Image: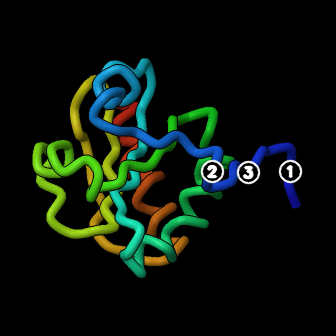
Amino acid sequence: MYGGSYLKTLSELKHFDEDDFKASVLEARRPVLVDFYADWCGPCKMMAPVIEQIAGEYGDKVEVGKLDTDNNPGIAMRYQVMGIPTLGLFNGGQLVDRLVGYPGPLGVKTWLNRALAKTLAA
């Protein structure tokens, strides 16, 4: 079941905020997947286990973390996050791709695989 990968729990995922976003996301040496969410958001709660699974399965390719849009509205506005959940893939200090809404686990992984392939090929 585990296949050698370590599945992180929600509490172990990185939580980005205004103070560390630049250093942790924009200046990261590898791609960073940011889950823009809010605690009250139903689809965000459905996305949470998928993000945990991605952190375990893709941990060697991408950093994974969450950003609470209610507590960090400046970052959400800066990246034009108009709906949540939104997944943002950052690389080299730029938002290179995004997924808005919750398309289910397969939809998230399909998007991420495509976005990473594009990003890593560039």
Q: Nearer the viewer, residue 71 or 85?
A: 71
Residue 108: x %, y % from top left: 46, 65
In the rendered image, which quarter is residue 92 located in? top left
Look at discs 2 and 1 and give the one toward the viewer.
2
For the residue marked with disc 3, what is the amino acid? Leu
Mark 1 sits on what residue?
A: 3
> What element does badge 1 sit on?
loop
| Residue at image location 27% in from the left, 58% down from the top | 70
Label 1 or label 3, whichever lies nearer to me, is 3
Q: Nearer the viewer, residue 17 or 59?
A: 17
Identify residue for label 2: 11
Examine the rendered structure and indicate whether residue 117 appears above or below residue 70: above
- Give the mark, 2 or 1, whose residue is nearer the N terminus: 1
| Amino acid residing under circle 2 | Ser
Percent from the top left, x then y, of residue 13? Answer: 58, 45
Q: Residues within 10 Å of mark 3 (few under 14, many from 20)?
A: some
Within-10-Å neighbours for mark 1: few <14, some 14–19, many 20+: few
The mark closer to the camera, 3 or 2, is 2
Would you say 120 lies left or right of 47 here?
left
Q: Residue sitting at 40 percent across and 39 percent down? A: 16
- For residue 75, side relative to residue 58 (left or right): left
Q: Which mark is residue 7?
A: 3
Q: Secondary structure at mark 3?
A: loop
Instruction: Specify the quadrant that holds the N terminus.
Output: bottom right
Whether residue 122 can be seen here: no
Task: Provide residue 119's location: percent of width, then percent of height.
Answer: 34, 36
**Is label 3 in contact with label 2 (beta carbons under 8 Å)?**
no
Residue at far front of view: 71
Image quadrant in which you'd find residue 10: bottom right
Q: Is residue 85 above or below residue 24?
A: below
- Under circle 2, the secondary element is helix
Residue 78 visible in the current orientation: yes
